[in-house]
Image (cartoon, coloured by chain):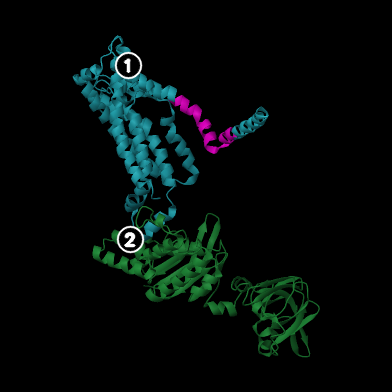
Chain colours: A green, B cyan
Amino acid sequence: MAEVTLRKVVKRYDDVEAVRGIDLDIPDHEFVVLVGPSGCGKSTTLRMIAGLEDISDGEIMIGGDVVNDVPPKDRDIAMVFQNYALYPHMTVAENMSFGLRLKHYPKAEIKQRVTEAARMLDITDLIDRKPKQLSGGQRQRVAMGRAIVRNPKVFLFDEPLSNLDAKLRVQMRIEIKKVHQKVRTTTVYVTHDQVEAMTLADRVVVMNHGRIEQIGPPNELYHRPATKFVAGFIGSPAMNFIPCRFEESGGLLQVRVGDTIALPIPPDRMERYRAIPRDTKLLLGLRPEHLVDAQSNTSATFQPFDATPDVIEPMGMETFVYFPLAGTQLCGRINPGIEARAGQPLRLAVDLNHMHLLNEATGHVL
Amino acid sequence: MVDAAQSMIQPVKARTTRSGLRKFFERKSTIAFFMALPLMLLIAIMVIYPAFYSLHLATLNKSMQRFVGFGNFTFLFKRETFWMVVQQSCFFAITAVIFKALIGFVVAHLVHNLPDKGQRKWRGMLLVPWVIPPAMSTLAWLWLFDPSYSAFNWILAQVGIGPIPWTGDASWARFSVILVNIWAGAPFFLIMYLAALKSVPEQLYEAAAIDGANWWQRIWYITLPMMRNIIAITTLFSLIVTFANFDIVRILTAGGPLDKTHLFATWAFRIGIEGNDIPLGASISLFMVPILAIAAIFILRDINKRGNEA
């Protein structure tokens, strides 16, 4: 096991820069998830760590050694691919033991390691089958088994759950987390699914356009996003962004949304926001769970307002309402017990303690 | 009354058989059969009929007047030239196929690893020997091998070697016909192997690289097993075509010197057509069937065994 360090890592293809100078420190045992939309450079970064892509500039270190020019086979890493990449002509046991056999491990040890990994992943009965005879989930387990038996310094996962159906994905997600809790190997995991990122990671790295937008534990990214991109990417349904402006009335700061709604800034945020120039174009960021029904949220921190929802989405444990406000479509989350109908006015409330204020031009959270 | 009733029933019956016939013609398997029919007729006329006709010919005497049973075959078994042709054909086919397969495999790898831009050009150029009719290209080789004006001998003379009797000496003549056959046949292996190589998922190589395999181990453990079926089928196909080769030997050496380069086909032609003994020629060519059948059984059995993997 080892720590992984990236220093100003750049990847250029001809005239396109896919990764633009990434710095990342991954301590030993940590589970790091690289997340971002497709084309953000997350997979390229992972493949550079694996040694499957050359590094155009910068340095990658595994266990303190620079590995820029070390071929993949000498990096002591294991990788799980999106389409599993199992060897179709080998049985499950042969697939899992391939790396050990190449390194001429004693037969008894190979057998013991394969048996142990198979037991951990619950694939003992499948050990003599060929990949063709396995389901998607079973193949995924074998691919993980192949990584585990090697006992490498680092695990790399490249969108391992994308080919599975929704139910199996949740199941395998838990499985991966369990495995990491047992073996504690440093793990870099790439996904475009923010739910996977939130649930699996010790720390999440949000990437966009080849750059790192923000690094932090899942809850920190959720509650204190640094940029509009992170705020919008993490969380489902996504955060609402409402154009607004600052007003001062009687020494108190207000956020004015549209012509009718003025929301007083909570006192503890007053100092932070006071320095913002008054003519700055702002966005008010509010997660759906902070746009709630006024009926069951009556405390002083909630500011009520009226809206007319045009779509209602009952989810069982919660109900989402979609309504227009100040020229944008917003999503709120109300108590499922409340009677709401599309086209009929509804009294909603804003929880300003969880508001975010963003600079519209720079996209930074203020 | 009864007549009237029957005349009413009959048209109904006719209608049902007509719609039944229509259904039969609209069935997918029927349509498929009729679409394949021209080819089946062609094969029947061009392959099955001549095959049985040559079986019939092989049982006649030289003037084709009298039935001699296995007489032609027992006569052949007693001739030394026959056994020499058997040996030569096997040696020719096996050596040529091995080298064609090896060269095809190596060149396919080289082409596969070329950058995509230039690859088509190289692929096209490397296919040329296979595309040119062998009768034509072998003529060019004949000039290259010419004892007095040979380009090869001229080059060798520059470094003080030779002259080599390319088609005049038995060993050199065998070498020459095999060389030309390899030259003309290797591109077929190249293109089949290249297609097989391209169908191996890149991620298998990446997984193997991460698992610790070097380039040789990647070929041994990934490429070869994944190409196994293509290699088997290509080898079988090439073995049949090479074993039955006619044009290259016919043009380059005409079987000489002293019958030392004859294959079944050229010797059958020499005896049957040129020697005016068609029944004996037919018996010679029929000997190819059992030999090739054994090879086909071995190779196809292996494919059946591994067919249900990938």
Q: Residue at x 28, y 67 (%)?
A: A112
Q: Report whether residue B113 is seen.
A: no
State the separation of the CA atoms marked 1 and 2.
58 Å
Task: Please give the range of residues in magenta.
Answer: B20-43
The kind of residue tagged 2 is Ala
Residue at 64% x, 83% y: name it.
A354
Q: What element carries label 2?
A: helix
Q: Which amino acid does label 1 sit on?
A: Leu
Of labels 1 and 2, the one closer to you = 1
Residue positioned 37% across, 63% down in the render: A146
Tag shown at residue A93: 2
Whether residue A88 is visible, yes or no, is yes
Q: How crowded is mark 1: few (under 14 residues within 10 Å), some or many (20 or more)?
A: many
Measured as percent of width and height from the top left, residue A160 is found at 47, 64
Along the line of sight, which residue is nearer the eye, B6 or A266? B6
Mark 1 sits on what residue? B57
Q: In this view, does A215 lie to the left or right of A268?
A: left
Query: Foreground: A159 or B306?
Result: B306
Image: A182 above or below B34 = below
